[in-house]
Image (spheres, rainbow, N blue to C red):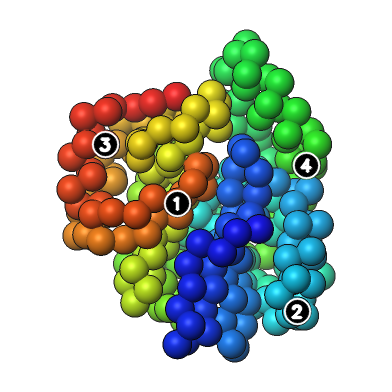
């Protein structure tokens, strides 16, 4: 559990949690706590430990904002919905395309089982943290592209399909923070190789994923918090040029 952003004047702290494979985030404000993704289902214990450390009650959690409906991001969302006061939010298309009565194993997992590092790290971690036993989400609230959500920091939804049909990022312009989900990452969940910001090759439509990062072209100086990898800080508008030069990476 690491503090990756802090605004002392407003009492805002953002914590990064997760493990070497996938990250999720807890945002603490004086009025409420909310989450960006939830990682693997077994990270529920991480969540409980984190709430104890910051001395907040689990019923102060208002929401789980999901970047997309892959099992390494939806994780304990349903447990949080059932056991806390949190509502679960996802893009409108995600709610329509996924009935949440079952979860399919993402195709990139199946396609890369032959890779020893993937098999002995991602899969071992996924099994350890119960990724494949994530509970279907019983009820969701939806949002649309460019919608500003009524949470501290007024996050703006930026729709970035490609990695998945429902993929979105959350831009907190007031804080200069972008939760990029799997639209742009700094590490690969397949190879675990640490990279400069890049677009993941695994996904529903990688070519579309590369095109839709143009939605970030108006964002300059920012702290980017990805779903895979460590935080990155810099001028994202300029970095997009370099990301396109790097191409799709595993």
- Nearest to the observer: residue 123 or residue 177: 177
- Nearest the viewer among 8 and 79 is 8
- The image position of residue 177, as x and y in percent, is 39, 65
Q: Quadrant of residue 224?
A: bottom left
- Residue contact at pointers 1 and 4, CB within 8 angstroms: no
Please report whichever mark, 1 or 4, sits nearer to the chain's N-terminal start.
Answer: 4
**Dot 2: what SS?**
loop
Task: Tell me where residue 22 sits by quadrant.
Answer: top right
- Counting residues from the start of the chain, the first of labels 2 and 3 encountered is 2
Which is closer to the viewer, label 3 or label 1? 1
Label 4 belongs to which residue? 129
Report the residue marked by disc 2.
55
Residue that carries the numbered disc 1 in the rendered image:
231
> Foreground mark, 1 or 4?
1
The residue shown at (66%, 35%) is 104
Relative horizontal placement of residue 80, taking residue 74 as reference (left or right)? right
How crowded pointer 2 is (Cα within 10 Å; few <14, some 14-19, many 20+) is rated as few
**Residue 133 placement, left or right of 19:** right
How far apart are the two marked residues, 3 and 4, measured between alpha carbons? Answer: 31 Å
């Amino acid at each position: 559990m690491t503090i990756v952003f802090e605004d002392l004047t407003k009492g805002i702290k953002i914590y990064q949690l997760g493990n070497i494979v996938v990250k999720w985030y807890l945002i603490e404000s004086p009025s409420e706590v909310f989450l960006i993704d939830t990682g693997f289902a077994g990270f529920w214990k991480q969540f409980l430990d984190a709430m104890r450390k910051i001395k907040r009650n689990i019923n102060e959690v208002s929401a789980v904002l999901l970047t997309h409906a892959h099992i390494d991001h939806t994780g304990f969302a349903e447990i949080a919905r059932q056991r806390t006061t949190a509502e679960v939010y996802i893009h409108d298309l995600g709610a329509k395309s996924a009935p949440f009565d079952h979860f399919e194993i993402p195709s990139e997992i199946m396609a890369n089982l032959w890779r020893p590092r993937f098999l002995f790290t991602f899969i071992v971690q996924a099994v350890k943290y119960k990724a494949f036993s994530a509970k279907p989400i019983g009820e969701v609230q939806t949002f649309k592209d460019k919608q500003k959500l009524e949470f501290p920091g007024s996050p703006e939804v930026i729709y970035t399909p490609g990695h998945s049909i429902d993929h979105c990022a959350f831009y907190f312009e007031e804080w200069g923070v972008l939760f990029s989900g799997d639209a742009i990452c700094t590490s690969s969940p397949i190879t675990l190789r640490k990279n400069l910001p890049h677009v993941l090759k695994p996904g529903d439509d990688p070519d579309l994923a590369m095109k839709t990062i143009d939605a970030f072209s108006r964002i300059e100086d920012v702290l980017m918090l990805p779903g895979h990898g460590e935080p990155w800080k810099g001028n994202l508008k300029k970095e997009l040029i370099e990301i396109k030069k790097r191409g799709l990476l595993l």
